[in-house]
Amino acid sequence: MAPLVKRCWATGFSLRRRISAGSRNFADGKLSAAAQMTMSTCVDSSPRSRKTSPWLMLPPVIEDGGDTVYKFYNLSEDKEKSFRRKSEQELAEDDAKFVGSSHGWLALLNQRNNNNLFLYNPITRRHIKLPPIGNLPDPKINLTPDGRRGSVYKLILSSSPDDDECIAMMIFGLERRLAFCHPCRSTEWTPIGELYYRLISQNFPMLDGVIGIFPRSYVDIVYSSTQKLFFCQTLSTMELECWDLANSLSPRIHSSWKFCRSDYSKKLMGWTEAKRQVNLVYSEEYNQLFIVMRYVMKRMSPDGSYVHPIYYGKYRGWDNSSPYGTIGFDAYKFDFGVEKPQLVKGSLDGLSMFIGINHSIAMPITPKSKLNPNCIYYTDSNRNSVPPSSLYGGHDIGIFDYTNRTISPCYNFPVDVESIKRIMPAPMWFTPSHR
């Protein structure tokens, strides 16, 4: 394992000085008394179980004979593991892209092969085909502009797909909608959630206050096996929805909360310099939901400062010689029955988080593990297509020490800008399962 050489960005201290605590109150969205009683009784401070810590999935290797070798790095044991798929074990995954990792299964989408969406377990070499996404309603907003290719932002599972009650939920389409299915028995996806929201202002009485109608755009989903509920975060309205899908014929929102943007008012810099990504992370051991803000600098120089973009003209386009990179995180603890999320300061209560396009989790670290507590292990979650000519992409990988606010390398992937290289497909977290 590469040594964890901690270092702060050159601008780190000045960035932290520019962060303001701001207001952290709910705009609205009270939890019903019944829901508070149901959910708060499940909250305690003792670990419930021990899970296998995630492995880092490395880019697969195609050998001369056509065999595919899936490579993983087990951080807790500091070991590499490989699993071979013979060339004759043909799957629909050639040219497919990874759109999720959950409960030991990879989710892949093949846009070139009839938008095939399927699950694959690289350890057992099993393959489960999911319902086609091309049959979802409203193809104009579900498919790419050419009307042919499907788009899946993220897919997670509630459990192993071998379980009859397993539910797969995905964020899909250009407008990032929600849909679910039962992998073992569904023949189609069921879309859920409202498509749009109305932006209202009292300054426009002639329009009944409605300024415009916009997509809700979900940005992350996570499942709690303790609560038997899916939590879904919207971007446009900053709402946290709690979905009960136990009855697939009658999906319902169990609870929902709406936050002001000032609830997460911490900023590292201006919007032109950095973007904020919202992640939902659940600790099953402590039955605790976290809302994690990830700050990514759009263009970074070797000293960690922002690089202003250069436009070279119509044919050459924008300069893409400077990589994007994560520069920090803030975690908010969300307790059921409490009216505002609380910024976590100092430590993560000994937990380590694993964030990316995977089913994000937080878990306590055992004494024998080589993982570090109070750290966020992150992989590249940039879903935007990277130009083929770009020198970067898939590279935003590292370990963020939440207590010391520093970033360290993970595996052999560097974090210093001058050493960063393009990694495709992007590594992601994978929780092994032999089922």
Image (cartoon, rainbow, N blue to C red):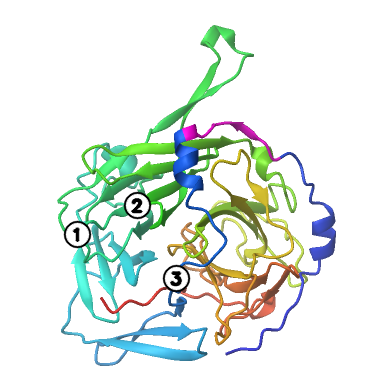
Q: Is residue 136 above or below residue 383?
A: above
Q: Residues within 10 Å of mark 2 (few under 14, many from 20)?
A: many
Q: Which of the marked residues, 1 or 2, is nearer the chain's N terminus?
A: 1
Query: Residue drawn 24% across and 43% down?
Result: 247
- Label 3 belongs to which residue? 49
Q: Secondary structure at mark 1?
A: loop
Q: Which stretch did the figure color magenta?
A: 24-33
Query: Camera-side residue: 7 or 76?
Result: 76
Q: Is residue 221 above or below residue 12?
A: above
In percent of width and height, residue 336 lies at: 53, 45
Query: Camera-side residue: 420 or 339?
Result: 339
The amino acid at mark 2 is: Met
**Front label number (1 vs 2):** 1
- Label 1 belongs to which residue? 164
Q: Secondary structure at mark 3?
A: loop
143 part of magenta stretch: no
- Label 2 belongs to which residue? 170
Q: Are marks 3 and 1 in contact (CB under 8 Å)?
A: no
Q: Are marks 2 and 3 in contact (CB under 8 Å)?
A: no
Q: Is any atom of residue 6 visible in this view?
A: yes
